[in-house]
Image: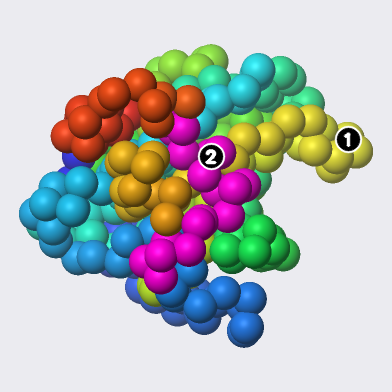
Amino acid sequence: MTTSNLKNTLMVVLLIAGAAALTGCGPSGAQSTDFASREVITSTTDADNRALAVCNSTSTAGLAARQMAYSEGNNYRMDLVWVKLTTLPAGFSSGASYISMWKWLANSNGATYLDSTSVPLALYDTQTKKFITSWGTSINWKSISSLALSMGYAEPAYFFGRVIILANLKDTNGEYDVLKVTAYNTSTNKAITEINGLLPMFPANPAAYATESSGVARASVLQKLHPFYSYKNSGYTTSQYQDMAKNYCF
């Protein structure tokens, strides 16, 4: 899916302006761009030529999501990413749980840094090609159920089959490595479950991802998050890995 047609709506103009206003620098001293596992590019052609994964999928029991790089026409933006919820946590439909997202990074020594500010989120209707909410810090069914019902959806699973999420990473330089999607108990605000997925775009071949541009080994915690980590000795070609990653797109 491309988003060049979004420029025709007032809502997207307001949202993207908000994204620009929220954009900031990465944590000072926490990571240099040399350590970043995301490939900072602008052209969709470059992504193909460099065999990058533009989409990803992450799941655990009771929670699953896919990610897709944000594009405007033939150009990518690193500060935004699409997210599609494919499995919702227990209690979500009753309002007993809600979802927030976070970003974190790791350097070659394995040291990690979690941004303490949750990632701003906005809901986008794939049928009308319009945003249906402003930026928020969490997704709670109670707060959007009336909106969903007006669209003909009483169950969140069907609603999120049509509606996807734009996440504002505030990360123009692509320094952050991972998007964490966390489900919380509404009453206690304690985490119930979480998934961690590499942010697009990254080398689709896990062997290529295992080494940083400097030649040193990438942090093990990141290597193990690669969607094809368990297949790295299975004999797949780089082209096959890239095609496998495209299957996660939506």
In the rendered view of the protein, which quadrant contains the N terminus?
Answer: top left
Residue depicted at 66% across the width and 59% down the height: 110
Residue depicted at 58% across the width and 55% down the height: 219
Residue 142: x percent and y percent? 66, 32
- Magenta segment boundaries in residue numbering: 212-229
Question: Was residue 226 drawn as part of the magenta stretch in this picture?
Answer: yes
Looking at the image, residue 60 sits to the left or right of residue 160; the answer is: right
- Secondary structure of the magenta portion, mostly? loop
Residue depicted at 48% across the width and 68% down the height: 35
Residue depicted at 55% across the width and 25% down the height: 59
Image-quadrant location for residue 129:
top left
Q: Is residue 135 visible?
A: no
Per the image, the residue denoted by label 2 is 225
Type of amino acid under label 1? Ser
Per the image, the residue denoted by label 1 is 187
Q: Secondary structure at mark 1?
A: loop
Q: Secondary structure at mark 2?
A: loop
Residue 235: x percent and y percent? 29, 24
Looking at the image, residue 172 sits to the left or right of residue 250; the answer is: right
Q: Which one is earlier in the sequence, the residue at label 1 or at label 2? A: 1
